């Protein structure tokens, strides 16, 4: 049950005056050494106004810590920030959705921008590397699909999210959405699994689109090796923003036009500055759901 204090905070921070007041108070507390550890509801104040307001609306429906999610709060905020800030038009695709916690953040980022749809791609059977499954899927009766649908309904994001139920590579062959503005790769974490997902979805990424790799720091996974050995050496990849969090690495698909490359560089500079602010604890004062057949 969400506390009265929490609900009051979220309601207040959905207004400009509330955000400005909360930022000022947080800045004062941190200057005297308080509230320096990562607290997602507080550090969200470093985001631009509409992005903060969107999160407050989400958290008034779902607790910010989430339930049975696989991504820690600081990484959720880093990916939310990227999804909200990255320029351009197009949709968002998430490979690996589990029970939809990260999906909610991606969809909220799109809603806060006023455009974009999220496609969540998963077998919802707890599938992981080597053809095995996560033990935790047993708690859901062998499928996380009901939990995913429930979370979208509770977050009031059913109209912003479409689930593509099935293997990530197979679903790429019949992708029904617009060119992809942000692609989050967080499914099979083996070297070959990341390679297959990247190659299958790369053609759908819009020029200038962002590709985000989660679990970059996971030592037993192949994500970092694939990114470092293959992705960052491609001529058609802009190796920026780069490592926005120790466990999150992002690159951009080249626009292919020299003059337009400036757009990417400017976006990278803005996103990097915002991410650095969150990682250092600084705060800036400024301002449906339908499974696709064929799974």
Image (spheres, grey):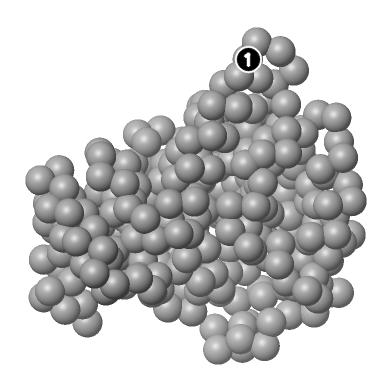
Residue 237 vs residue 63: left or right? right
Which residue is the site of mark 1?
A: 260
Residue depicted at 64% across the width and 63% down the height:
247
Q: Is residue 265 above or below residue 91?
A: above
Query: How many numbered tags mark residues here?
Result: 1
Tell me the quarter of the picture where residue 141 sits. bottom right
- Quadrant the C terminus occupies: bottom right
Q: Is 254 located above or below residue 8 in the figure?
A: above
> Can residue 175 be spotted in the picture?
no
Secondary structure of the residue carrying numbered label 1 = loop
Q: Nearer the viewer, residue 11 or 123?
A: 11
Q: Quadrant of residue 221?
A: bottom right
Q: Residue 95: x and y, percent?
A: 66, 55
In the rendered image, residue 223, in percent from the top left (x then y), is placed at: 78, 61
Vertical placement of residue 36 versus 255, above or below: below
Alpha-carbon neighbours of circle 1 within 10 Å: few (<14), some, or many (≥20)?
A: few
Residue depicted at 58% across the width and 58% down the height: 245
x then y, percent, for residue 116: 46, 36
Which is nearer the eye, 14 or 128? 14
């Amino acid at each position: 049950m969400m506390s009265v204090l929490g609900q009051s905070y979220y309601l207040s921070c959905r207004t400009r005056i509330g955000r400005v007041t909360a930022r000022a108070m947080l800045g004062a507390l941190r200057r005297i050494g308080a509230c320096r550890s990562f607290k997602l509801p507080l550090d969200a104040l470093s985001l631009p106004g509409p992005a903060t307001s969107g999160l407050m609306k989400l958290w008034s429906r779902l607790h910010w810590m989430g339930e049975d999610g696989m991504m820690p709060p600081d990484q959720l905020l880093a990916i939310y920030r990227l999804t909200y800030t990255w320029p351009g038009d197009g949709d968002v695709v998430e490979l690996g959705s589990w029970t939809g916690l990260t999906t909610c953040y991606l969809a909220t980022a799109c809603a806060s921008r006023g455009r974009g749809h999220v496609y969540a791609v998963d077998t919802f059977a707890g599938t992981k590397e080597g053809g095995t499954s996560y033990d935790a899927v047993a708690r859901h009766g062998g499928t996380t699909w009901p939990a995913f649908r429930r979370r979208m309904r509770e977050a009031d994001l059913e109209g912003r999210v479409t689930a593509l139920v099935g293997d990530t590579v197979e679903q790429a062959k019949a992708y029904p959405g617009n060119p992809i503005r942000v692609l989050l790769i967080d499914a099979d974490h083996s070297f070959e699994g990341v390679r297959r997902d990247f190659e299958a979805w790369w053609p759908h990424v819009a020029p200038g689109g962002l590709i985000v790799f989660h679990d970059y720091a996971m030592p037993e996974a192949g994500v970092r090796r694939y990114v470092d050995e293959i992705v960052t050496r491609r001529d058609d990849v802009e190796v920026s923003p780069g490592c926005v969090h120790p466990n999150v690495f992002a690159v951009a698909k080249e626009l292919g036009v020299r003059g337009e490359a400036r757009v990417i560089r400017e976006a990278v500079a803005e996103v990097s500055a915002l991410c650095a602010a969150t990682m250092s604890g600084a705060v800036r004062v400024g301002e449906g759901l339908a499974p696709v057949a064929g799974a």
